[in-house]
């Protein structure tokens, strides 16, 4: 750990510079994704259109600017995912001065594992949860009520689920840092497993739509990842003399 004290103004300046680099990377990724925004949109919302009919349904645009701004948001979402390695790199760079010298060598693994966990969570949600969620809501159609979903609303729900599963799967990294840095003893984290399960289900209820399927499918993996983070943190936790 760096024992030299750094003025608060320098911390704020460094934070501002790193946020600027993250935003530039996000902008660059969004510009690169803009040309493919329609293809990305079609792939991302495939679970929703598939739920509308056996041959796939179509979404509605009820405002003149809806298509343009939805594609713009789609490019921003893709740019955010593309810029994740840069985001995690600068996040590590900001917290690294507070770590011991032996801990700073984990920069590359931190960036790689954090990116893989986010991508894995988003992929898990897209593959297993999104179809169930949209089929659940499409099931309320009847002979006198036909589902006519707008592209903006469907994209908003998809983005919410996408980010919920991506961010939720970062839990092992957070638990690992709490344990490895000595802030919380791994035994205390493992002993508080029942509270971890409760928090997982609360997060599942807050981050997903009001259906039990998506809530359980988010809370279940979060519980497993919590235990995994505790076990990994136990390995790297500072040993008491």
Image: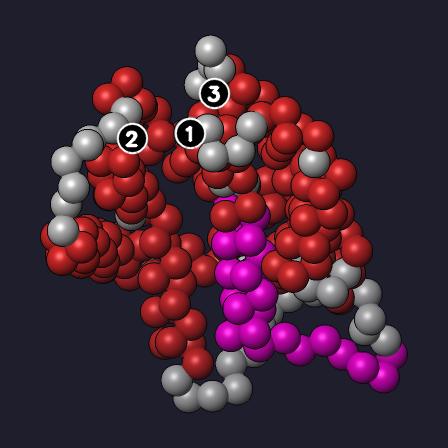
Q: Earlier in the sequence, mark 1 or mark 2?
A: 2
Q: Quadrant of residue 80?
A: bottom left
Depth check: 70 or 82 in front? 82
x, y percent for residue 9: 13, 57
Q: Residue at x 53, y 33 (%)?
A: 184
SS label for mark 2: loop
The residues bearing labels 3 and 1 have C-alpha atoms spaced at a distance of 7 Å
Q: Earlier in the sequence, mark 3 or mark 1?
A: 1
Residue designated by label 3:
237
Q: Residue 128: which quarter of the image?
A: top right
Residue pictured at 63% horizontal, 75% vertical = 149
Q: Name the main secondary structure of what is drawn in magenta.
A: helix
Q: Secondary structure at mark 3?
A: loop
Q: Quadrant of the N terminus?
A: top left
Q: Is residue 171 left or right of residue 137?
A: left
Farthest residue toward the front? 241
Asked if residue 17 can be seen in this view, the reply is no
Q: Which mark is residue 99?
A: 2
Magenta stretch? 143-166
């Amino acid at each position: 750990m760096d024992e030299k004290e750094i003025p608060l103004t320098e911390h704020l300046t460094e934070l501002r510079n790193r946020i600027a680099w993250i935003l530039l990377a996000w902008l660059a990724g969004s510009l690169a994704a803009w040309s493919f925004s329609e293809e990305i949109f079609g792939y991302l919302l495939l679970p929703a259109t598939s739920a509308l009919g056996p041959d796939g349904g179509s979404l509605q645009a009820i405002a003149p600017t809806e298509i343009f701004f939805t594609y713009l948001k789609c490019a921003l979402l893709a740019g955010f995912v593309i810029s994740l390695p840069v985001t995690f790199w600068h996040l590590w760079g900001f917290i690294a001065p507070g770590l011991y010298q032996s801990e700073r060598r984990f920069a590359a693994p931190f960036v790689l594992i954090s990116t893989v966990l986010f991508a894995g969570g988003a992929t898990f949600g897209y593959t297993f949860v999104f179809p169930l969620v949209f089929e659940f809501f499409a099931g309320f159609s009847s002979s006198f009520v036909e589902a006519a979903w707008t592209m903006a609303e469907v994209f908003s729900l998809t983005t919410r689920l996408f980010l919920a599963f991506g961010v939720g799967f970062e839990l092992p990294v957070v638990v690992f840092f709490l344990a490895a840095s000595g802030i919380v003893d791994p035994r205390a984290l493992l002993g508080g497993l029942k509270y971890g399960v409760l928090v997982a289900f609360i997060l599942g209820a807050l981050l997903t739509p009001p259906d039990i399927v998506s809530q359980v499918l988010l809370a279940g993996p979060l519980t497993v990842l919590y235990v995994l983070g505790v076990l990994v943190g136990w390995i790297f936790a500072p040993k008491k003399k």
